Image (spheres, grey):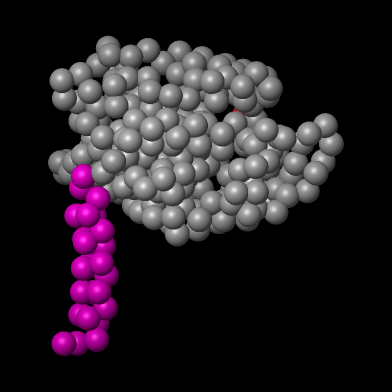
Amino acid sequence: MMREMEISRAIIEAYTAELLESLSLDVAIVGAGPSGMVAGYYLAKGGAKVAIFEKKLSIGGGIWGGAMGFNRIVVQEEAREILDEFGITYRPFRNGLYVADAIETATTIASKAVKAGVRFFNMIEVEDLVLKENRVAGIVINWTPVLMTGLHVDPLTVGAKFVIDSTGHGAQISQHLVKRGLLKVPGEGPMWAERGEELTVKHTGEIFPGLYVTGMAANAIAGAPRMGPIFGGMFLSGRKAALEILEKLG
Ligand code: 48H
Ligand code: FE2
């Protein structure tokens, strides 16, 4: 066989095998930001079959840019153990705040998640939910460029026992239930760092049978204030959702 065809076959076979293997999941996570990737890591570590679907080419969501492009993030004392779990380097600042490199944070969480067994599918956008007998039962997926260009191409479907909306600001996946009148999402409030962090974690959970929210999506569901470039709440939220789901999966 021509070398070029061998290369093509290697890619197509490897990718489609993984996609076929992911058609029926324990957990489908939508969005590869901090909360989604941390959730994926703990779920995979706990033995769940989990994949993350990310509409962009790059994973990492809002981590890369730190704040205003200053690529550092702040993490508070309560979430320091998660930095330790991943082996991310940090420096103490003061008043229980720590500073980590955004690039190291994004790459390390992604790498640990992959090695724990999370499958990442990038450039795939979740455009709807599967809803059966009043329970979310999967996600409806399409190529991001198809949706960007507005081509009329129907999607495919992935089944999941649980779906996590980790899409950040706006809670994109929960919005599919809002537009059908099944859910209300008040949206996030103006900045108040401590309160935003607290409420994000508090409101992380199952908001509709089969559908969990984490991170800024949980914040939007709760109508809680935004918190700016402090990421401990995102990590703690991802871990909380993962541990709750692992318990339900038994
Ligand atoms: C597939 C999708 C879809 C879709 C979106 O925004 P994120 O980083 O999300 P979180 O909640 O884990 O982290 C939030 C944090 O980054 C942040 O913005 C903070 C702390 N802000 C505070 C403030 O005051 O501003 O990541 C979400 C990911 C992104 O990569 C999107 O591309 C992806 O989800 N995504 N993927 N299908 N329909 N919608
Ligand atoms: Fe943000």
How would you classify the magenta stretch by its main secondary structure? helix
**Above or below, comparing residue 148 to residue 233 in the picture:** below
Q: Quadrant of the N terminus?
A: bottom left
Residue sitting farthest toward the right: 94
Q: Is residue 40 left or right of residue 148?
A: right
Which residue corresponds to the image point at 61% horizontal and 22% vertical from the top-left?
Answer: 198
Residue 140: image x %, image y %? 23, 37
Who is closer to the viewer here, 103 or 162?
162
Residue drawn at x 19%, y 55% as measured from the top left: 20
On the rendered structure, is 42 left or right of 235? left
Whether residue 67 is visible: no
**Magenta span:** 1-24
Does residue 39 belong to the magenta stretch?
no
> Relative to residue 100, is residue 59 drawn left or right?
left
How far across and how far down the image is residue 174, in percent?
35, 24
Query: Does residue 49 lie above or below 214 as drawn?
Result: below
Which of the two residues, 6 or 38, is positioned nearer the viewer here?
38
- Which one is in front, 150 or 32? 32
Location of residue 36 (image quadrant): top left
Number of callouts: 0
The residue at 38%/23% (across/down) is 206
Q: Give the x, y percent position of residue 139.
A: 25, 36
Q: Is residue 231 above or below residue 117?
A: above
Residue 178 percent coordinates (x, y):
32, 17
Residue 94 falls left or right of residue 79: right
Q: Is residue 17 magenta?
A: yes
Quadrant (top left/top right/bottom left/bottom right) for the C terminus: top left
> In this orientation, does residue 96 appear?
yes
